[in-house]
Image (tube, rainbow, N blue to C red):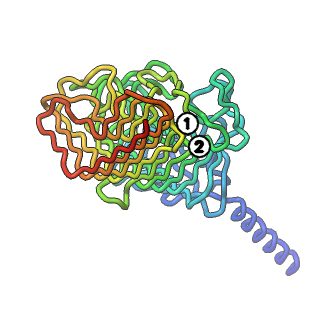
Amino acid sequence: MKKIYTKLLMGFLFFIGTMSANAQVTVTNPSNTTPGLAATYATLDAAIIDLNLQTAISGPVTITLDASNPQTTPAGGYSITAILAGASATNTLTIAGSGNTITAFSPQTVNSRNDAIFKIIGGDFITISSFIMVENAANTVAALATNTMTEFGVALFAASTTDGAQNNTIQNNTITLSSATAYQNAIGIFSTSASSSTNTAQAAASIAGTNSNNKFYSNTISGVASGMYFVSPAQTATVFESGNDIGGTSAGTGNTITFGVSNTAGNLAYINYSGATAAGIYFRNVVGNSARYNVINSVTTLTLPSGGIFSANGTSPVGITYTSNFSNNQITITNTGITAITGIDFGSGLSTGTIIANENAVTINQFAVAATSATIIGIRANYASATNTVNANTVNINQSN
């Protein structure tokens, strides 16, 4: 009988040990979600699939990918679709990468232009941190009609016209796309409230439908056509996307962006998107945001029109009061073409807006092989505003021809 008990005990311990060995994801406070997460999962994909079945959150929850557990995404990327009732500044969801490498799926669906490593679709108060996100080296077809590439490192989408992705934090991640092939649609972090996650018409119908008040801190982005790209419908008093903070309030939270992997204009075909200008940070129809303490460098082989922090509007904003603050950034753009180059451009203005551009260091190198008459602008802030403060900036322009 003693031998039987010993064997049973050994078998039980082996079973527990096997479960532990297979568990790669640990959940802190799983009971704070409804109907409830498990304490462990075998893969990050399994954890996110279960997360998407949750309907509410009553306290902080952290999903941690244990150290030394690299993962490969499902086709199209990890899609976080959970809309958690009760989400707030205290009832938060954190997905922590522990420095693990997440590799994009291969091959992505032919001619798809909405693939990512992570997608947040309508979720609020979600943090994605400490991941190394990379394109799959096997994804090498960049021609648009047959492309199998990954477009985004992290993408934020609205779930509906009245449910945007808000108050999320993307921080301490390293994003490297297009490492094997120069892909004109590779963007480190992408956000749109002008169309859906599947690239169909879905323009925000209210402030609640915008991707507002998100934070982007301490990310390192490279191998991209543009570093970060924000798209919204035309800004009005009722549809106003604002409060996004790119870089925080000190050098310790600034992002490091290297952009311009391709000299072919982007062609995502998203509503209100324009890929004509390669940029470190691009705002399309978006005002009232902060981009500070970022280090932005282009590659040295760019010929496309290019900008460090660049804003443009299909339709200028109306009826809103806002502050746009692009300060304390270090921007270096090197371009060998004869196209326009801009360090910082606020894109538009209103008599009820505030424009701030202080203590930026902008260096523009235009080493064209032919004479050029294209415009070079260090900082463009000559727009209507209630207050316009542009102080203590340094602009260096170096040209050949």
Density class for disc 2 (Cα within 10 Å; few <14, some 14-19, many ≥20) is many
Residue 123 seen from this side: no
Density class for disc 1 (Cα within 10 Å; few <14, some 14-19, many ≥20) is many
Q: Say which residue appears at 37% left-offset and 61% top-offset.
A: 252
* Relative horizontal placement of residue 313, taking residue 332 as reference (left or right): left
Q: Say which residue appears at 40% left-offset and 45% top-offset.
A: 168
Q: Say which residue appears at 69% left-offset and 31% top-offset.
A: 141
- Determine contact: label 1, label 2, CB under 8 Å: yes
Q: Nearer the viewer, residue 20 or 222?
A: 222
Name above or below for residue 244 compared with residue 161.
below
User: Which numbered disc, 1 or 2, marks the residue that appears first in the sequence?
Assistant: 2
Name above or below for residue 101 compared with residue 303.
below
**Amino acid, disc 2:** Leu
Secondary structure under the numbered disc 1 in the rendered image: loop
Q: Nearer the viewer, residue 39 or 179?
A: 179
Marks 1 and 2 sit apart, C-alpha to C-alpha, by 6 Å
**Amino acid, disc 1:** Ala
Give the residue at mark 2.
177
Give the residue at mark 1.
186
* Relative horizontal placement of residue 101, taking residue 235 as reference (left or right): right
Residue 130 image offset from top left, x and y in percent: 51, 57
